[in-house]
Image (cartoon, helix red, strand yellow):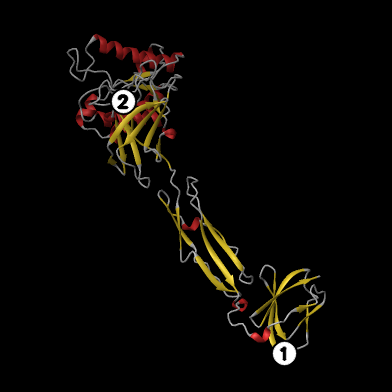
Amino acid sequence: MHRRITAVGGSIAGVLFFQGESDSLAGTSQSDYETGLTTIVNAIETDFSGTKTMIGQLGHSNKSGNDIIRAAQVEVIKNNSNALLGPATYDIDLSDEGGDTLHFKSDSDMLEYATRWYAAINKEFYGGTSGYGPVINETALIYDEANNKVVVSFLDDLSLVINNSSSVTDSSFDLKNNNSSVAISEVSIVDNTIEITPTESLNLAQTITLTYASLNTAVNAAIYDSNNLPAQPFYNITVNVVDSTPPIITLNGDATVTIEIGSVYRDAGATANDNVDGIITENIVTENPVNINSVGVYTVTYNVNDSAGNPAVEKTRTVNVEDSSLSLSNFDDKYLGIKAYPNPGLDFIKISNIVETTPYAIYSFTGQLIIKAVLEPNSKINVKGLKPGIYFIVINKQIILRFAKK
C-alpha cells in the first residue's frame, strides 16, 4: 500500500478499520487480537508518519467471540495514540429484512452503517461536532454504598449525553463482585447517568467491575445520545467505591478505670476496623490527659478516620484518679473540733487540737498533692512557698480542712 500510494504521489488522511467477524468465530484470544491490531496500527503510522487508524466496532452477530474482539478493539483505542475511536454498530439488527445476523445486507442497515462512519470521519478528520455516542467516564464510575447503586457517567461530544428514550435493561450490563456476576434488580436513567441497582449490597473489600455491551442478546437495547449514536461498549471497568460507612472503634478493657494517685497508669487502648480498609488500629488518634499526680476524673478519647474520610464514632474511657487518704470512713472522735488558723494565712498556719505526731497532706484546689509531712503538737505548717489560692489539708487521712493562702 505504501509503495503504490507513494508511486502516484498520493497522501492519506487516515485509515478506516472494520474487521473481526472471522476472529470471533475462530476463538482468537483478546490478547492475541490486541497484539495483531496494535501491530497494524503502528505499521500504518510508520509507513505514513502521523497517519491514524480509525477502528470501527465489530457489528452485531450471534457469535460468542464478539465480546472478546470488541474488548480488544476498545483496549487498542484506549491505549494506542495512533488509534481513533470509530463508530459502534452493535445495536443494528442484522437479522431482520432477510439478514443473516452477521452482514449488513438491507438498505436501511447499510444506510445506518454509512451514517455512523460518516459522523466519526467528519469529526476526527474534518472538524465535525458529533462523531460518536457516549463513552464511559471511568473516573466517575462509582458504587454508592449508602444507596446500593452503581452510577455510570459518560462523556460525549454533545451537551446532552444520554437520550432519555434510550433502552437500558439489566441484560445490557454485567456487574461483577470479586469476579462473580451479581444480579441486577433495576436499571434507570437519572440526570444523564445510568443507575444500576444490584439485588444485594456489594462487598466493598472485593473488586467491583462493570461491563456494558448490549451484545448478542440485547440488540436495539442501547444507550444513545441526542443524535442517536450508541454508547461505546466497555469491558470489566473497575467501579470506584463511594465509602460512606464509618470505621468502628472498640475499647480494650473497661470503659471506667479507677487508680490511686501516684500509681502507674497504662492505658489499655482500642482497636479499629473498617468495612473497606480492614484493621486500622494503628491510625487511631488517642488523647490521654490523665495526670496520675492529681486527683480528678479524666476522659481518654479515641478517634479514627478511614481512607475515605469517614470518622468513627468517638470512644471514651473514664479514668478516676483517687486518693484513699481522703476517705472519712475511719473518722476518729479525737479530731473533733480541730481547725486551721489563721485562715487565710500568709506564711504559716497552725492546726488546733493536735495532741500527738500526726501525718498530714496539702492538696491544691484541683486535687494535686503539694506537701506530705507530719505535724507535731503546737507546731506550724510553713505555707510561704504556696501560691495564693484555696488549698485542702488532710489530717491523718481523716479530716479535711480548707484554707486560703494570701
Q: Position of residue 39 (x, y in %)?
A: 34, 30
* 316 lies left or right of 229: right
Circle 1 packing at 10 Å, graded few (<14), some (14-19), many (20+), is few
Residue closest to the eye, 208 or 377? 377
Q: Amino acid at mark 1?
A: Val
* 199 lies left or right of 392: left
Residue at coordinates 21% horizontally, 32% vertically from top-left?
A: 27
Residue closest to the eye, 77 or 182? 182
Q: Quadrant of residue 34?
A: top left
Label 1 close to label 2 by CB (< 8 Å): no
Classify 346 as above or below 193: below
Identify the image quadrant of the N terminus.
Answer: top left
Label 1 residue SS: loop
* 32 lies left or right of 146: left
Q: Which residue is mark 1?
A: 355
Residue closest to the eye, 343 or 173? 343
Residue at coordinates 26% horizontally, 30% vertically from top-left?
A: 171
Label 2 residue SS: loop
Q: Quadrant of residue 150?
A: top left
Residue at the extreme top of the image, as rendered: 107
Q: Position of residue 29 (x, y in %)?
A: 26, 35
Classify 282 as above or below 54: below
The circle on residue 168 is: 2
